[in-house]
Image: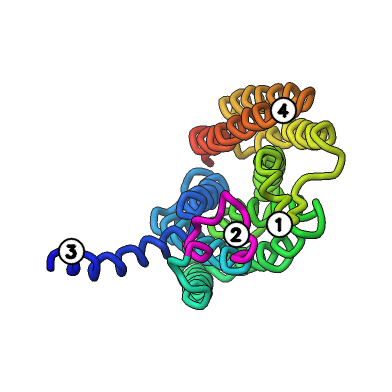
Amino acid sequence: MESSITTMQNPPASKLAAFYELTKPGIVLYVAITAGVGAFVGSRGSLQLWLGFHTILGTGITTAGALALNQYTERDADRVMKRTRGRPIPSGRLSPQSALYFSLALLFSGLMYLTFTVSWLPAVIAAFSALIYEAVYTPLKSRSYGATLAGGVPGALPMLIGWSAATGMLEPAGFALFGITYLWQLPHVLALAWMLREDYRLVGFKLIPRGGGRIIGMHMVTATAALLPTVVSPNILGYTGVWYLAGALLATTYFLVVTIFAARNMTSATARKVFQASLLYHPILLGLMLFDTIRL
């Protein structure tokens, strides 16, 4: 009797956990934090608490909806790849229909929340981000390496969501933060794609350029080298101080060295080192921005 009661009670909890997993909460949290940092720097360290809260929450809800919708769109490919077979839809824990309704509800709720609690401009940018993610990046994945280049745009737009939330406009310094986040993603995604290349080959995803490890290494090095002048731009524009500048240049130089060594002999092990370095690099930059934003 007790066993049957437990069995009856578990499915609702399991389904809630599956919906939660569908949103990729770790990514959602990081994207929301990125938007918060963009708002903080844009406000020159004088961000109002409630504005920051609404910006972070609205960005998080919208991102959760977009990520969940992506899992619905890619459910057939997810059934094939070893890494994704256990996701809520291919594993059978959620039906495609329920996942679709849930993701759309989250996406539109997040956009409405941003519109009414922050302003229309962050909501428009968030909608544009979701559109690129679903209508450009996702279909391009099976057609062209351009998917990786396009996918960096929605990944970097949270900086502009936050910036516009704090300032009510788009400014050069906001685009500088966008550029930093965009360039950081390229070696990050390329390293991951190289490690998962066999899985991606099963479903025909073309997230890495043709030419093998040497070409991929060149792309990684080029993007990371471009970060060196880009990370300086917030200083040039007067938004960050000397501590940010020193830390950003040091972190970027280290990141560049890691990519150069990987490019010399691209293997899963060296790609993993680039990926791990990328996981440290951007949070360090965000922390430096928070610590050393120049207040007026």
Residue 137 or 97: which is nearer the viewer? 97
Image coordinates of residue 295 in percent, x first then y, are 52, 39
Label ID, residue 259: 4
Cα gap from disc 1 to disc 3, whole angstroms: 41 Å
Tell me where residue 52 appears, x and y as whole percent.
Answer: 45, 55
Which is more toward the observer, 128 or 121? 128
Find out whether the residues at labels 2 and 4 contact each other: C-beta distance under 8 Å.
no
Contact between marks 1 and 3 (CB within 8 A): the answer is no
Task: Give the crowd class for mark 1: few <14, some 14-19, many >=20 residues within 10 Å.
Answer: some
- Check the image and report above or below for 33 versus 125: above
Magenta-drawn stretch contains 9: no
Which residue matches tag 1?
Answer: 203
Q: Where is residue 78 shown, x and y percent of the image?
A: 60, 59
Q: Mark 2 points at which residue?
A: 78
Q: Which mark is residue 264?
A: none
Residue type marked 1: Val
**Residue at numbered disc 3:** 3
What residue appears at the point 51 percent right and 71 percent down from the top-left corner? 103
Magenta residues: mostly which secondary structure? loop
Of the numbered discs 3 and 4, the one sitting upstream in the chain is 3
